Image (spheres, grey):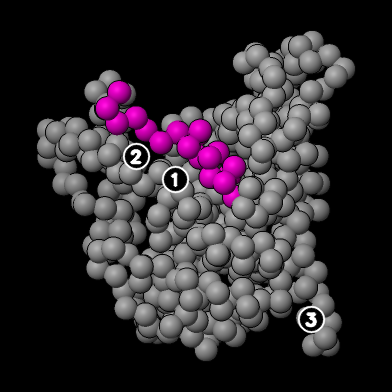
Amino acid sequence: MKRIFSVVLIFSVFLLGSCERYETGEGSGDGAKPKMSEEEIMATAKKIHEEVITLDTHDDIDTKNFTEEANYTSDTDTQVNLPKMKKGGLDVAWFIVYTGQGELNEEGYKKAYENAIDKFDAIDRLVTKFAPDEIELAKTSDDVRRIHKAGKLVAMIGVENAYPIGTDLDNIKKFADRGARYMSLAHNGHSQLSDSNTEERKENPDKPLHNGLSELGKKAVAEMNKWGVMIDISHPSQSAIKQMIELSKAPVIASHSSARGLADHSRNLSDEQLEMVKKNGGVVQTVALNSYINVEKAKKRSDESRKIIEEFAEKEDFKLYKSRSEVREKLSEEEQAEYFKKYREIAKKAEPTINEKLKETAPPVDVKDFVDHIDYMVKKIGIDHVGISSDFDGGGGIEGWRDASETLNVTVELVRRGYTKEQIEKIWSGNLLRVLDEVQKVAKEIQAEGE
């Protein structure tokens, strides 16, 4: 798929000869690093990146970028689109059907369902109307490999917040039929199904609503098992996560979470939770969102950058909100899209000033910090339970992996730290696809029992 590396591959083979050192490295987890020059590391990484399937489990979408006039076939002002995926060698993007948490009543459920269907429809337009020759929807690991082998990019679908299913659990099958292959039972705020991690916020924490999962939420776990939808534990509360893992007959995933042992954030998983995922057979997709990777470093950079951005915003008479959560609470989805678009424009104008003024005093969270979390989790729970996600277009993006076009840099850092090709393949896609296979196997068994 990654044809842009073809010229580099010739150079890589020249440098590496027949020894293929990346196959014989000692790997990570013991501090071992390959004895290679930077040129050899780069050539090795490019060769591995070309040969493995790279998969990112969390890419948010705005349906305004799925129209005839503006869509992902062109280099839209987003962190993910087809040109950026091709440039960076990102093979598989999980497009997210996200719905913010609203009122727990029929009106709220109806509006949320309409929002979800609108996003399912947008993804369908991309793969069937706008770019069927460039990207195809996958529902199984076999689909992923078939589509990739055919030279096309791969789209998959995750549902962030099960709020749109309302109280009708039949909607889980409807979403699965549309291609949903994972779903979280809550987002930032308690849903009708599950408590959220927001009960752990240091400021204005939400009081528990269900003490974990509601009775409907427990039934939802069973339905997800039945229809082959992976259970995503990235946003629910600690109690809800524990209950989901205990109830599920199949492995779970954390679609975009990092290690709390390195960054004490409520969206990250503790060592105890990591061990639970390991015993469950699941996988944790390390997320490239700066405040989930290094809380202190991200806050200092953010605070100092904010001051500079405020100066630029004031010149353009643009009101800044305190946080992404406040934007989502106070603005409609349409208004949010306009706000973030304008914010990005102003931030981009301010970027040169930020980089110059803060390069020594407040450096950004970067790919090295990100891979620190991969190292940490590999050592804690093993190479078979760790994966990669970006949360692009939803807050993610770090220095060195700011968008899909820079995806190679992650592989470069993994090679630099001594990970082998086999290990890198597991981290980039093998582990997640293995869990998907197991979840779908369990679903077939449950359906057979029902018959």
Most common secondary structure along the magenta stretch: helix
- In the image, is residue 428 above or below residue 94? above
User: What residue is disc 3 on?
Assistant: 447
* Secondary structure under the numbered disc 3 in the rendered image: helix
Q: Residue at x 47, y 64 (%)?
A: 235
Q: Quadrant of the C terminus?
A: bottom right
Q: Residue at x 69, y 24 (%)?
A: 34
Residues rendered magenta in the picture: 360-377
Horizontally, residue 44 falls left or right of residue 99, namely right
Q: CA distance from mark 2 to mark 3?
A: 48 Å
The disc placed on residue 200 is: none
Between 123 and 350, the one lying in front of the other is 350
| Residue type at the position of mark 1 | Ile
Q: Is residue 264 magenta?
A: no
Horizontally, residue 426 falls left or right of residue 95, namely right
Q: Quadrant of residue 297?
A: top left
* Secondary structure under the numbered disc 2 in the rendered image: helix
Categorize mark 2 by other alpha carbons within 10 Å: few (<14), some (14-19), many (20+): some
| Residue type at the position of mark 2 | Lys
Q: Residue at x 59, y 42 (%)?
A: 375
Q: Earlier in the sequence, mark 2 or mark 3?
A: 2
Q: CA distance from mark 3 to mark 1?
A: 40 Å
Q: Quadrant of the N terminus?
A: top right
- Residue 264 screen position, x and y as percent: 40, 54
Q: Quadrant of residue 303?
A: top left
User: What residue is disc 1 on?
Assistant: 293
Q: Quadrant of residue 201?
A: bottom left
- Residue 224 screen position, x and y as percent: 65, 75
User: What residue is disc 2 on?
Assistant: 297
Asked whether the beta carbons under mark 3 and mark 1 sit within 8 Å of each other, the answer is no
- Residue 6 screen position, x and y as percent: 74, 19
Between 57 and 113, the one lying in front of the other is 57
